[in-house]
Amino acid sequence: MNSLYMPKDSLIHSLDPRTKMIFVAFVVASSFIMNDPALQLLLLVALFPLVVIAKLVKPYLISIQFLLLFAVLIMTVHGIYNPIGVTPVFEIFGGLTFKYESMVYASVMSFRILVIGTGAVLFVMTTHPSDMASALVKWKVPHSFAFILLSTFQIIPIIAREAKIVMEAQQARCLDVKGNIIQRVKNLVPMFAPLFIITFMKVHQLSYVLECRAFSRKGNKTSLRETNIGSLDYSFLLGMLAVLVFEIYLKLFMMGSLQLTTDALLTYSLIGTWVVCGFMLIKFLFKRVQGKVGGVN
Amino acid sequence: MKAQTNNGEGAETMQPYMSVKNVSHVYPNGVTAVKDIDLDIYEGEVVAILGSNGSGKTTLVKHFNGLLTPTKGEITVGGLNTKKEKISKLSSLVGYVFQNPNHQTFLPSVRKELEYGCTNLKMSESEMEERVNKAIELFELEDKLEDNPFDLNSSQRKEVAMASIMAVSPKVIVLDEPTTGQDHKGCKRVLDLVRMFKEHGHIVVLITHDMHLIGELNCRTIVMNQSRKIADDQADIVFSHKGIMKEAGLQPPQITSFANDLSNLDSSKTYLTVDSILSWIKENKEKKEEAVQIGSGS
């Protein structure tokens, strides 16, 4: 299977793709409703058990660390420089102060990225692309449009594989891919020119193949993989509805009295992301050094 | 008959140009693609690597120019350990022609394509000129120099890809399935080119499924099966060994099977080409006629 889909036997995997699509919409909506760092952090933590249920902890952590990079940048830069901040919270070297209002703003934004990212990763990794396409068709989305989505998911790993071959092919022509940064930018041309051409050729060929197999025929199409909404889906949907109602209630009536966000929480979450990012950096550097020591690897 | 090397041209006394010592390769996903391979390749040899898909042929040859490094054992090419050298350096010794020329060609003209490898090696203008001209001559590309490689047909494009590798003038040239998807003329051209490379003192390593090609060349043949080397000998000896052929799922050229099945032929010899059988028949006929003449004379 060449896509981001990870076949596992879990409750989340057996949900109908439509339920999961609604779930993604729900996650996006709640990340906007809960306009408060503490509540968003709570949401993020609450999503994690779902990742555990889906048995995807390791791939999830791998894919989420790139989003964490964004979070660190946003929290640091906004926390210091965003002009909406007035109340200083703490100061780091050189008179740079993190201000309360700007930290709230930055935390909301970066947690939102993480929350939506988690929802999206859950959806993509647990849903077979063709299931998603057939679910979309059930929602009366035109079949060709569903196919566009489907083929996008499937072509990414194909391009990745081709890119590897092209890189090897250019290395076989004495191209030094392990040069400095300028060298690497220059190398983009021999890498991407063949890759683009091959991709266009492949897509062109795909269109012929589709036509040969009666893709443009009018009328309903059946699918080999059937998806059905069962009791599990209904309970999941109900749960989401309940949480959503609670969120709205919280937002409308409790916001005045409930004050979870404190200086300490903001500071700790900021330092927390720094620590995790620092750890990632050390791991990356360690691998590089190991590669250098161990020879050409 | 495992791993016994037969160097037809008395190469035993020579130092091997490329030596593979007890090499295994395990991919990051845990698949062992090559296991415990020992192999010496000498100057002036043409070596064909045979085996079914997924038997580890391509993985093995990717070690020759350092695209992959062995997870166990070591490989030396021209005295250099592939683990310690840059791929660009090794690529100037071992040219690797990929199966699909589209992966390698990207420049707007054939001439630029030929010069590309040399510019990567930062050669002087005059040296580059000399090498490129040599490749042009070898491949008879004089009238196509300003064409865009993508306007050429697939066999011509393959030839351009080959020429662009040869322009660097590597000692060893690896051809990955050179005859796949080629018409008869293209296959014949590949055969001629391989012979020409040999004449010019290159070592040629062929990965192929084309038994006819190997039959014509009658070169040293390595058979791989399930990541291991199961045979290493002259093509006629390998082809006559039914057990190995069956194990690797190979079918010798039709004419060889035909000759093997004809019981009245001289069974100690394996015939690889139509010509060899024809000459044998002719010889036999002459003998018979002689015998008849002697018979009638007495």
Image (tube, rainbow, N blue to C red):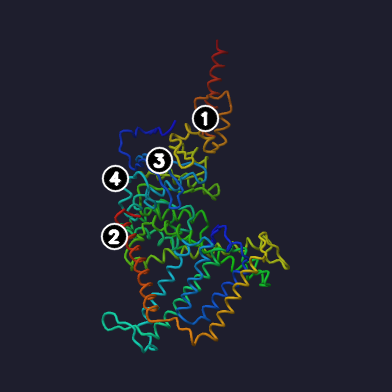
How far apart in space, not on screen, are marks 3 and 1 (Cα)? 38 Å
Instruction: Give the mark, 4 or 3, whose residue is nearer the N terminus.
Output: 3
Kindly identify which residue carries mark 4: B79
Residue under label 1: B279
What's the CA distance linking mark 4 and mark 3? 18 Å
Q: Chain of mark 3?
A: B
Q: In the rendered structure, which disc, 3 or 2, sits on the residue that comes first in sequence?
A: 3
Q: Nearer the viewer, mark 2 or mark 4?
A: 4
User: Residue, x 72% and y 67% (percent of image)?
Assistant: A220
Q: How far, Cα to Cα, is label 1 from label 2?
A: 51 Å
Residue type at mark 2: give it. Answer: Ser
Q: Earlier in the sequence, mark 3 or mark 1?
A: 3
Which residue corresponds to mark 3?
A: B37
Amino acid carrying label 3: it is: Ile
Q: Quadrant of the C terminus of chain A?
A: bottom left
Q: Position of residue A159 (x, y in %)?
A: 50, 62
Q: Which label sits on residue B124?
A: 2
Helix, strand or loop under label 2:
loop
Quadrant containing the N terminus of chain A is: bottom right
Front one among A190 and A231 = A231
Q: Secondary structure at mark 3?
A: strand
Q: Mark 2 vs mark 4: which is more N-terminal?
A: 4
Camera-nearest label, 1 or 2: 2
What is the residue that sits farthest to the top in this orientation? B298
State the SS at label 4. loop
